[in-house]
Every structure is written in structure tokens, then in C-alpha cells.
Amino acid sequence: MAGVQDRVVVVTGAGGGLGREYALLLARHGARVVINDLGGARDGTGSGNAMADAVVAEIRAEGGQAVASYDSVATEEGATGVIGTALREYGAVHGVVNNAGILRDASFAKMTVDQWEAVQRVHLFGGYHVTRAAWPHFREQGHGRVVMATSTSGLYGNFGQANYGAAKLGLVGLVNTLAVEGRKYNILANAVAPLARTRMSEDAAPAELLERLPAEFVAPVVAHLLTDECTDTGTVLIAGGDRVQRVAYFASKGVTFTGTPSLRDVADRWSDITDMDGSALGTNPLA
């Protein structure tokens, strides 16, 4: 099994929590890891080198290979710097884990434009910028792996996280298209919604529940998506506690109208339109 041996993998937000677990496991299986972390607070304010440096030191102490990157993924320049670190230090980039994130929670009625945009810039724009910087290298070498960190807040919704949920589901939409465009270049793109006890989730659920969600459980799932053996693309997973699940959209059988329906026609058939009995895995009807 080739796994991730000698592969160069960038993990953003790897200074703690889930990103740290991903980086440690990848390095233990022979990957050369770029530990990217701005070193800020949970809300994205501040910066520092200590978090990324500590994970690099931990990996090296175990005999692994790692290097730090302190660039912000929220800008094109920062993402270019992240991928540039991989190219400069290891001469290649084979995979990216877009894990970096911040929280600016507020109910939609009270959410400010700054709270909305700050979260989009780190999560959605960050996933785009880092992947975009790596994409030409993936295409040229005929190999690439992209893992996006999505969230159940995006898949199902969560009070106070309209900004976060929108960004996280936006990353799923990005994965869907990257999977289509990347397939002929052996570039695979998938998403994982982790359920784990981290700095980001410390007040999102009761402590007794979080205790049953160790961050290290998610790491093997993310690592598998980066291996040479993985052939899935466009897949969305939920991983946490003792369970790993695939999430997929399903379409109802629906109703076929003859000609343009009236408002009354739609209302009369609404229960048939929305009935999920006999549903099938949804596909893009325009593709």
C-alpha cells in the first residue's frame, strides 16, 4: 500500500485541534507535511508562530517531516505563500486539506456584514485560494487530492451560524465541480464534516457529548482521502465519535406536467412533488 508515503500534503489550520491530528497521522505514515496556521484566536483575530511551530516540532521529534507556514488562507497572496512553502521545501505538492476556520457566531437578525464576510473569507475563499494555487501543479503531474472541511451546520443548518453554514455548504458545491473537472487529471476532491471536541466546538454541545468525540477519530478518514488508493471523488462524509457516514442528495420521483402548470396545478400536486418514496440519488439534469 502506497498510502501517503513521500507525498507532500498541505494542512491548513494545523496548529491545533483537528488539523493537528490530520498532520500528525499523515506524517506518521510518511507524508511530508506543511503545517499552515496563522496562529490567531478562534474568531480570527491575532496571529503568531507558536502553534504551527509546536506541531512541526512534535512531528520532527517523532522522526517525521514537516515545515511551518504562517500565511493567511483568506487572501490569494497568502494561499500562494502556503503552496510556495511546499514547493520550496519539498519540490512538489500532492494534496491539500482545507481545514482552517474561524467562528463569528450570531443570530441572522443580529449578524453584521463584517461577521458574515470574515467567515466567508477564511472558510470559502480560503478553500478556493489554497486549492487554486495547488491546482496547476496537480494538473501538470497528473495527481492531486483535495479535502474540504465542511460541517453539519452547512448540511443541516444550526442556529447562530448562517455565515459558517453558508461557507461550509459552499465548499461542498466547490467539491462537486472540482470532482468533475479534476477527474481526467487524477485529481480527486472530497469533503468531510467532522464531529469532534476542539477549540472551535467547545461551547457548541454539552461537555459529556464532546468527551465522546475525540479529534483523532476523524484523522484516518481524512488521511484515506489523500492516499493513492482512494478512488472516490465528489463524496461528502460525516465522521465523529464511533461512526463514519456518507451524505448524499436524493431527488423525489416528482411530477411531470404537460405544458406550463398553473399555480393551482402545482399546489394540487405538491404532496406528490415532495414525496420521497421511490427517491433516487440526485444528479445534475443539465450535465
Image: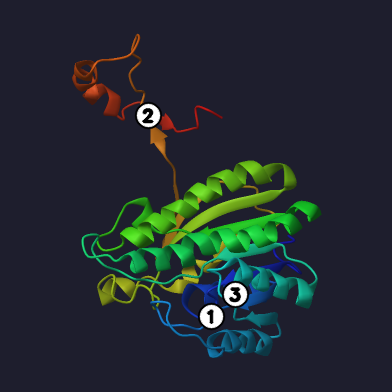
The answer, for residue 221, to whether it is visible in the render is: no
Nearer to me, 91 or 38: 38
- Tell me the CA gap for discs 3 and 2: 39 Å
Where does the image place residue 187, in percent across and percent down from the top left? Answer: 68, 50
Where does the image place residue 19, in percent across and percent down from the top left? Answer: 53, 73
Amino acid type, label 1: Leu
Question: Residue at 49% across / 27% down in the picture?
Answer: 285
Where does the image place residue 150, in percent across and percent down from the top left? Answer: 45, 58
Label disc, if present, on residue 38 of the rendered structure:
1
Residue that mark 3 sits on: 23
The answer, for residue 71, to whether it is visible in the render is: yes
Q: What element does badge 2 sit on? A: loop
Instruction: Indicate the quadrant containing the C terminus: top left, top right, bottom left or bottom right.
Output: top right
| Closer mark to the observer between disc 1 and disc 3 | 1
Mark 1 or 3, nearer chain start = 3
Nearer to me, 231 or 117: 117
Amino acid type, label 2: Ser
Label disc, if present, on residue 279 of the rendered structure:
2
Amino acid type, label 3: Ala
Question: Residue at 34% across / 58% down in the picture?
Answer: 153
Instruction: Indicate the quadrant containing the N terminus: top left, top right, bottom left or bottom right.
Output: bottom right
